[in-house]
Image (spheres, rainbow, N blue to C red):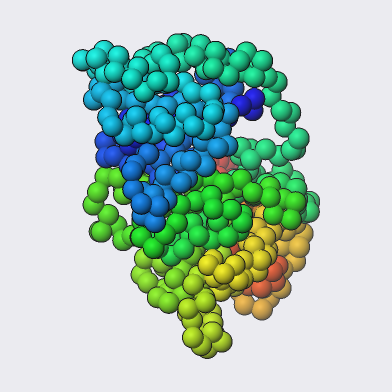
Amino acid sequence: MSFKVAIIGRPNVGKSTLFNRLVGKKLALVDDTPGVTRDRRVHAAKLYDLNFEVIDTAGFETAAAATLQGRMRAQTELAIDEADLVLFVVDSKSGLMPDDKAFADVVRRSGKPVVLVANKAEARGAQGGMLEAWEVGLGEPIPISAEHGQGMPDLREAIIEAIGEDRAFGEDEEESEDHPLTEVLVGEDIADPDVETAYDETKPMRIAVVGRPNAGKSTMINALIEEERLLTGPEAGITRDSISVDWTWRGRLIRLFDTAGMRRKAKVQEKLEKLSVADGLRAVRFAEIVIVVFDATIPFEKQDLQIADLIIREGRGLVLAFNKWDLIENPQATLADLHEKTARLLPQVRGLLAVPVSAETGRGLDKLMDAVLKTHQVWNRRVSTGRLNRWLERILGHHPPPAVAGRRLKIKYITQAKTRPPGFVLSCTRPDAMPQSYLRYLVNSLRESFDMPGVPIRMVLRAPDNPFAGRANKRT
């Protein structure tokens, strides 16, 4: 991208709405409640013929540095530092507030080019508020409506004038990666069922971090990328948006998704929390591997198991992280107990990898990423049809399927139809009569024989085609 733009202003002036307008998607959560946005979000944006990166920020508020609002302001100041241009947004409907003038001084002292944006200009009586915006001393206010898309041509002209034509229309950097992070990779079909492809370590990986509120998800991501990128603190429920962070680990591109804490559905009453949880669920569906962060001091709450079950049903690779391990007094006994509970409470993904970590001290994070890589390899594993049917022949000789209603069930062959997660098609007579217990036996045996621990395995039953079906009997 040629330049980077930060959207700055006090709470509830429409910064996230303008962000969504510029990126062309409803990425940032928008609500009438002030202070919805807390973390800074970066995304590629386009305004007619201008291509740039835009940063959505938390609303500027006057508060002590140790408070949540103070930490949010620090994140916004970091966004100003890394931006090439600042869009200072005021609310022309409500008029100028004292905070607007105070924060305009902060932006002015940064020395960055500034465009003053008077949002909500479509409202009745907005003309007076727009004229008041001259008082902040940042030049002519540009009247726009981020909600309805009005005033965007004027905003484009103001950006070009502020940053200069050479910078505004600079050449985009060529993509050097063979596999961009936006490439859709999930659920790709197998082209040749008889060829086992090697695991591609050059492809980028998408990882979502989920869990209950205050389990340490944002702290873990900050520790992994070694940067205070996400807002953290002792308060539960700080994260609201699903924030993506690009990172390189051992030369491999990784996109990490931080999500809002997921409470029990019965406790989620407010509209904003419902939006946050829905945003987190979208991140899970987009991810390839999901790290479920457990609080090691109170692990395996009912909500933890429901989150893990949801990820398994979505077909994503799953890794458990027992966080806050530095608070455990008897680690050996506790770890043995947690591994036993993992195997007992999540039997549908036998061999699930669980790693004790401490996001606060950084302990165990390398082992966690090794577990993620191993799970991703298994999630992408492909077994040839020949090996599968030789395995099936041994299984049927050792333990054939039971007879149902006095009639034998015959299994013809098996083949792998998909990866990500591994999906198999089993051709057999009377698929509807196959006992679930025998299917579980086949899946568990498949895991052991082909080393597929800890990932969901799909097994689809299909009756073989009858070449004589539909033909009438003919007398000779």
Residue pushed farthest left?
125
Q: Position of residue 456 (x, y in %)?
A: 55, 61
The picture quadrant where one finds residue 389 is bottom right
Q: Position of residue 94 (x, y in %)?
A: 23, 25
Q: Position of residue 87 (x, y in %)?
A: 46, 26
Q: Position of residue 67 (x, y in %)?
A: 36, 54
Is residue 190 visible to the viewer in this orientation of the structure? yes
Q: In the image, what residue occupies the spot 67% across and 38% down?
A: 180
Nearest the eye: 113 or 330:
113
Q: In the image, what residue occupies the spot 52% across and 76% down?
A: 325
Is 107 situated above or below 374? Answer: above
Q: In the image, what residue occupies the spot 39% across and 56% down?
A: 66
The image quadrant where one finds the C terminus is top right
The image quadrant where one finds the N terminus is top right
Is 259 situated above or below 355? Answer: above
Nearest the eye: 89 or 392:
89
Is 437 situated above or below 431? Answer: below
